[in-house]
Amino acid sequence: MVIIVLAQLQQQLILDLIQPSGTNDETPNTTLSLLQAGKLSEYEQLEIYRQSILQSLISSLRSTYPVCKTLLGDTQFDQIATAYISTHHSVNPNLNNYGDEFSVFIQQNIAVRHLPFLADLAHFEYVWLQAYYSTDQAVVSILEQIEQVPESDQVNIVFYLSSSTCLLQSHYPIFDIWQSHQILDQEAQNKSTKKMTIDDINYSTEIHYWILDRLGNKVRIHNLSQLEFKFFDLIRNEKTLSTIVDSLTQYDKEASFTQLLLEANDKAYLAGIKP
């Protein structure tokens, strides 16, 4: 019984700590009973912990979305971050994983509707960070693995990408925006180096495609053609070799599955096959 009561107190304390400021009147007496009034009231003591958690999560979002923060400015970014935190509680002890729904939140935020590229940029920054902290995966030869499969069964082969791989597409040049803000210290004094601002962004109807993954200790980002994107998208959706060939041929009669496979193998984008 004591264990159950303790667990309930811990759960209630966590819930109260993640409540936004100004909700003290709703704080149950069980939480306040854990505190002792002194120079500060129980409510004021609780608020200190709340602010500490809030600032920690805001700091985490700043680290995850540095380019978004730069483009919005500290004040507006922190306002959006605070609103996000109030409805998206941290449930993972690793704060590098916090903010996975931030791009969706931005897309639905009226305050930044005039920046239609921002949600895509936020998604880009999040998946880049996830790739950066992902586990290294051994480089394999897909061609050698295919050779081990009986020829009659090769049509049913399913390829798979590494766990760090992400396919991205956007109507906006988010990679160019992001890259322009990755300035090394030794380049900081170079007057020809210019970070893209909101006014520099080209709102075209062209769709951009990228593949992002980690190889060794570096995150790779490469532009893709629409055909290459479709090829990797079919792999991501675990389509069989025969289905991939048929789909590519229907999309482009001159598409060469073999060439696409060889290039993907040479660039180590593929992590293995499932016969």
Image (cartoon, rainbow, N blue to C red):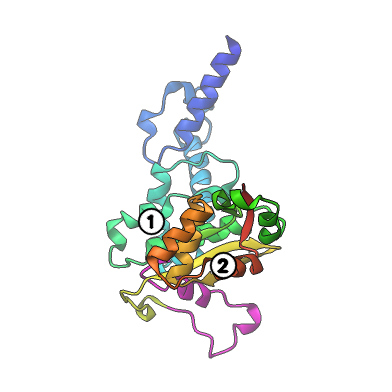
- The relative height of residue 1 versus residue 231 in the rendered view (above or below) is above
Q: Nearer the viewer, mark 1 or mark 2?
A: 2
Q: Position of residue 267 (x, y in %)?
A: 64, 68
Q: Which residue was labeled with disc 1?
A: 79
Q: Which residue is mark 2?
A: 258
Which quarter of the rendering shows the N terminus? Answer: top right
Give the x, y percent position of residue 10: 54, 25
Which residue shows up at 47% across the image and 39% down it? 47
Q: Tell me where the magenta segment starts and ends, as one range.
A: 168-196
Q: In the image, is residue 7 above or below residue 75?
A: above
Q: Residue furthest top?
A: 1
Residue 95 lies in the magenta stretch: no
Q: What amino acid type should be assigned to the residue bearing mark 1? A: Gln
Residue 66 badge: none
Q: Residue at x 32, y 67 (%)?
A: 115
Provide residue 266's location: percent of width, then percent of height: 65, 69
Residue type at mark 2 is Thr
Question: Could you tell me residue 92's position as x and y percent?
Answer: 56, 40
Q: Residue at x 44, y 22 (%)?
A: 29
Q: Is label 2 in a helix, a strand or a loop?
A: helix
Is residue 64 visible to the viewer in this orientation of the structure? no
260, 127: nearer the viewer: 260
Q: Residues within 10 Å of mark 1 (few under 14, many from 20)?
A: few
Which of disc 2 and disc 1 is earlier in sequence? 1
Magenta-colored stretch includes residue 172: yes
What secondary structure is marked by label 1? helix
Q: Nearer the viewer, residue 148 or 27?
A: 148
